[in-house]
Amino acid sequence: MAEIRVEKLHKAFADFVAVKDSTFTVKDGEFFCLLGPSGCGKTTTLRMIAGLELPTSGQIFLGGEDVSFKRASARDIAFVFQLFALYPHMNVRKNIAFPLLSQGMPRAQIDQRVSEAARILRITDLLDKPVSGLSSGDRQRVALGRAIVRQPLAFLMDEPLGALDSEFREVMCQELRALHDRLKATTVYVTHDQLEAMSMADTIAIMNQGVVEQLGAPQDVYERPASVFVADFIGSPSMNFLPFEAALNEGAHTVQIGPAHIDVPALREGVSQRTLLCGVRPEHVTLDDASPLRAEVLGTEYLGTSRIVTLATAQGATLRAKVGVGSAAQRGDQVGLQFDATAVSLFDQASGRALKTARDDRAHTRAANQGARHG
């Protein structure tokens, strides 16, 4: 397998810019997710890596070789699509073997590779069955088998689980990650589903309007979103935002929202007077009648192990708290709100970018420790 390096990748269709100067590296053996809403540029990026689209500018390196303008057939990659793209007149064995037959590989070697791929995917008992009678999950395994037998430098997957129902998609997420770990494969995976990305990826690139908004490990993009878009896109329910006006000095560790002074991680940069956003995840909001930050309960949702309480603050913001099932909060109640000071994020409302705080220090230390362990 091989490293994939993308440098200042740009793609325009006439006046529409689909991908704007993206730069990132997929490490050898890494499971890398391109995540974002429809139309954000993730599939266009994947198609350029595959050679199905040529970039307007920028470079793509596969195993150190510049393949920016090489055809897909010259890139030694395997592509798995959302729609299984199997040959209905062939059985499972012939579908998996087809790429090798096209290369003129000897029959004995083809049989060996097909058997090994079937063993890895646990479909040995299906090899002689027609694909038309298979379940959607088994057909997806056959599509994966056809990619595996080629033993390519990298696997590229474009929402391969999108056609499956939610329960089976969760099972296939586990199987795909386990397959990746067995093969030690370099994998680039496109999805709009944050749960897929968070559960499978080593690294996530979150895209919005053709731009990579943030690049990092799942834990980092969840705990330290680099922008309002990332904070809102990642998490279910998503992050809460409370606007306030302030000028803050470097080192400040409290902000004032209405009558309440909210503890926050110490700032690593000062900001002039402007509108800022205090961001906090629902699980870091508690109901505390002693708090001067007041809100009215608009409704509650029972989720089995927790309850989601929707609230409206006196300042006009709507937010959600994830509390225990024993919470007595009812619609119409007036309650106080308390935030976990170590988990608060601050954003500049105009730019949408996160302010640097002490949370970044902790994340950098964690990343350095992880790098040292891997080294």
Image (tube, rainbow, N blue to C red):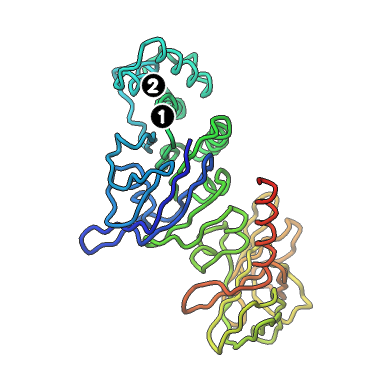
Q: Residue at x 49, y 47 (%)?
A: 26
- Identify the amino acid type marked 1: Ala
Q: For mark 2, give the secondary structure.
A: helix
Q: For mark 1, give the secondary structure.
A: helix
**Label 2 neighbour load within 10 Å: few <14, some 14-19, many 20+:** many
**Label 1 neighbour load within 10 Å: few <14, some 14-19, many 20+:** many
Q: Which mark is residue 169?
A: none
Rendering coords of residue 237 (x, y %): 57, 59
Q: Residue at x 50, y 78 (%)?
A: 349
**116 relative position to 78: left or right:** right
Rendering coords of residue 195 (x, y %): 54, 48
Rendering coords of residue 104 (x, y %): 30, 17
Q: Residue at x 58, y 53 (%)?
A: 217
Rendering coords of residue 190 (x, y %): 43, 46
Q: Residue at x 39, y 21 (%)?
A: 96
Q: Nearer the viewer, residue 147 or 39?
A: 147
Question: Given the current orientation, which residue lies at the most extreme top position?
Answer: 108
Of the numbered discs 1 and 2, the one sitting upstream in the chain is: 2
Query: Which residue is tagged 1?
Result: 147
131, above or below 174, in the image: above
343, above or below 291, in the image: above
Spatial CA span between label 1 and label 2: 8 Å
Q: Which mark is residue 96?
A: 2
- Identify the amino acid type marked 2: Ile
**150 relative position to 11: left or right:** right
Occupied quadrant, residue 133: top left
